[in-house]
Structures are given as C-alpha cells and as structure tokens.
Image (tube, rainbow, N blue to C red):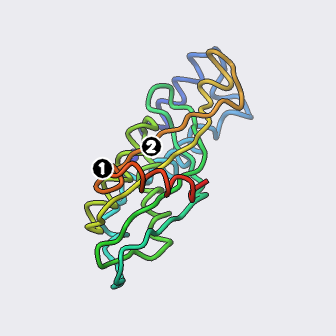
Amino acid sequence: MVDQEKVKKAIELLIEGIGEDPAREGLVDTPERVARMYTELCAGYDDDAKVHLSRTFTAEGSEAVIETGITFYSLCEHHLMPFFGEVSIAYIPNGKVAGLSKLARTVEVYARRLRIQERMTGEIADAIMDELGAKGVLVVVRAEHMCMSMRGVKKPGTQTLTTASRGILSEDSRLRDEILKMMN
C-alpha cells in the first residue's frame, strides 16, 4: 500500500521546507529510511482482521475471555505523530474462541494505520464482535499522544482512555462493570 517513491519525494521536500539540505551527509539517506519506516508503521492497510480471527476453536459456555496489556504503537491521522499504549479486550464467546495471539494481531491491524484512538477502539470491538459472533465485546485503550506530549499543550504523561462495548457488554451495565474490574 505504501508507495515508497512518493514518500521519499515528500520527505526530501519536507527536509528542504524546514530549511535543511537534503544532500547533507546526515540527511542523504533519510528519505529512504523514512519510506521504509512508514511501510512498517502503516502495514495495517495490507492486513485484515478477518484473516486473524477466522481461526477459531469450539468453546462451550459463556464465560468471559479477557486479554490485557496488549502494547501498540500507532500514528495520529491529525499530526502524523505517534500515540502508543495498551489495549485490553474482553469478549463473551458464543460457542467459539480465537487463539489469544489473534487478539493482539487484530489490534495491530488497526494500530498500523493512520487513526484516531476513538476509531481504532471501535474498529477492534467491531471486528471481534463480527468475526467471532461474540455475545458481547468490551475494548479499553489507554494511550499517550505525542501531539500532546511534545508539542501543543506539552503535557507529557497525559493519557487518553477510550472504550467500546458491543452486544451484551453494551446492554448489561452490571456485567460490563464486573469485567472492567477484572481488566484492571
């Protein structure tokens, strides 16, 4: 998806635009390095959560599956600056469960795209709900945004918390609160 030649040209223009010399020794290879970096950071465009969540196992009962501490790194679509943190996912299976690594891979699909945290949180919840046919899903994302930490208001350490609930975990506040306590 990433057109490395266009990224290289854009970075060369950026270097010139901020008053630097793109032919300077320390900058001559920067456009190529940045193009490779964006290929990695935006790999989610070439990935699909359906692929990861399609491998399931039969699981009787309806107990919650909870995975916490899934580290992620993403890029804010407003400033192209990083935001990073942790995702916690809980879902109530409806006869099938995904392998635990598949939840982390699903997070990566959406984190490796230009996003706002709120959209990413909802996309993760929707993918798990839709692909697993879960009875309910709860996703909690806690992240620090570099656009707030190193520029603008300059408040390092500030964290943004977003949640998305679907199905029974959206409808039953008692159950949602119980699962939130377990997540913490």
Which labelled disc corresponds to residue 112?
A: none
Is residue 173 positioned above or below 47 on the image? above
Residue 174 x, y percent position in the rendering: 42, 52
Furthest-front residue in view? 174
From this viewpoint, is residue 109 visible?
yes
Say what secondary structure mark 2 lies in.
strand
Amino acid type for the residue under numbered disc 2? Thr
Name the residue located 35 percent from the left edge and 48 percent from the top edge.
Answer: 123
- List x then y, in percent, for residue 40: 52, 52
Is 170 in front, or is 74? Answer: 170
Q: Which residue is mark 1?
A: 171
In the image, 58 versus 63, the foreground residue is 63
Tell me residue 75's x, y (percent).
51, 38
Q: Earlier in the sequence, mark 1 or mark 2?
A: 2
Identified at 36% across, 74% down, the residue is: 62
Query: Under tag 1, what secondary structure?
Result: helix
Q: Is residue 157 above or below residue 167?
A: above
Q: Position of residue 119 (x, y in %)?
A: 37, 39
Residue 83 appears left or right of 76: right
Q: Disc number at residue 163?
A: 2
Left or right, 104 with respect to 49, comes to: right
- Above-or-below relation of 136 to 26: below
Count of all numbered marks drawn on residues in the image = 2
* Residue 1 visible in the snapshot: no
Q: Are marks 1 and 2 in contact (CB under 8 Å)?
A: no
Q: Residues within 10 Å of mark 1 (few under 14, many from 20)?
A: few
Q: Disc 1 versus disc 2: distance between alpha carbons?
A: 14 Å
Q: Mark 1 belongs to which amino acid?
A: Glu
